[in-house]
Amino acid sequence: MSRSEPIDIAALYLEHHADLFRYLCRLTGDPDLAADATQEAFVRLAVHAPEPGELRGWLFRVATNLAREWARTQARRLRLLDGAVHRAPIGEPVPAPDAALAAEERRRRVRAALQRLTERDRTILLMREEGFTHREIAEAVGTTTGSVGTLIARAINKLAAELGLGEEDL
């Protein structure tokens, strides 16, 4: 596909939507934010297509940046609301059934452990989970392809330590 040829957004959506959404859910821990960032990334794809061969990485990069910006905006809003609790009270969520509660607790622990990692380690692990190549990961985090394997191993060990897992659990 060259830049002068129109791109088939529908086909690209079918090919990449599920992976992009899953990645953003893991990155943000917020399915609604992930859905919004995924949708906006495809809108931006329709407006400004990347060079041929860069599509998947471009989509993930754009969506990651959108999710981070929206998360920062949300954090600012929450700080403002915390200062004005009497004007905008926030209710407690309804408790989930036991099985859903246990699953949510596991997700919370993993999300919290991921958040305690550096942004670089978190990005490396999430990109690896989504099947990115070492070359793509290296480009995303600004390192060499040869060092990605070592960085992945170190990030996995850090995550395991954050979760309180020993080598026998890995």
Image (tube, rainbow, N blue to C red):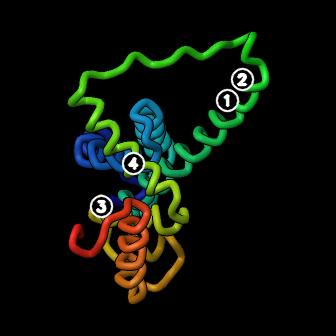
Label 1 crowd (10 A; few <14 / some 14-19 / many >=20):
few
Residue 155, percent from left and from top: 41, 72
Which residue is the site of mark 2?
A: 81
**Residue positioned 31% across, 45% down in the render:** 106
**Residue positioned 40% across, 65% down in the render:** 159
Which residue is the site of mark 3?
A: 129
| Residue nearer the viewer, 59 or 94 | 94
> Earlier along the polypeptide chain: callout 4 or callout 3?
4
Which residue is the site of mark 1?
A: 78
Which amino acid does the dot numbered 1 rest on?
Leu
Q: Mark 1–mark 3 contact, CB under 8 Å?
A: no
In the rendered image of this protein, does residue 112 appear above or below residue 80?
Answer: below
Label 3 crowd (10 A; few <14 / some 14-19 / many >=20):
few
Q: Quadrant of residue 35?
A: top left
Residue 53 is at least partly visible in this image = no
Q: Which residue sits furthest right?
A: 83
> Earlier along the polypeptide chain: callout 1 or callout 4?
1
In the rendered image of this protein, does residue 83 appear above or below residue 42?
Answer: above
7 left or right of 62? left
Which amino acid does the dot numbered 3 rest on?
Glu
Determine the CA span between mark 1 and mark 3. Answer: 30 Å
**Mark 1 or mark 4: which is in front?**
4
> Earlier along the polypeptide chain: callout 1 or callout 3?
1
Which amino acid does the dot numbered 2 rest on?
Leu
Which residue is the site of mark 4?
A: 109
| Residue nearer the viewer, 133 or 121 | 121
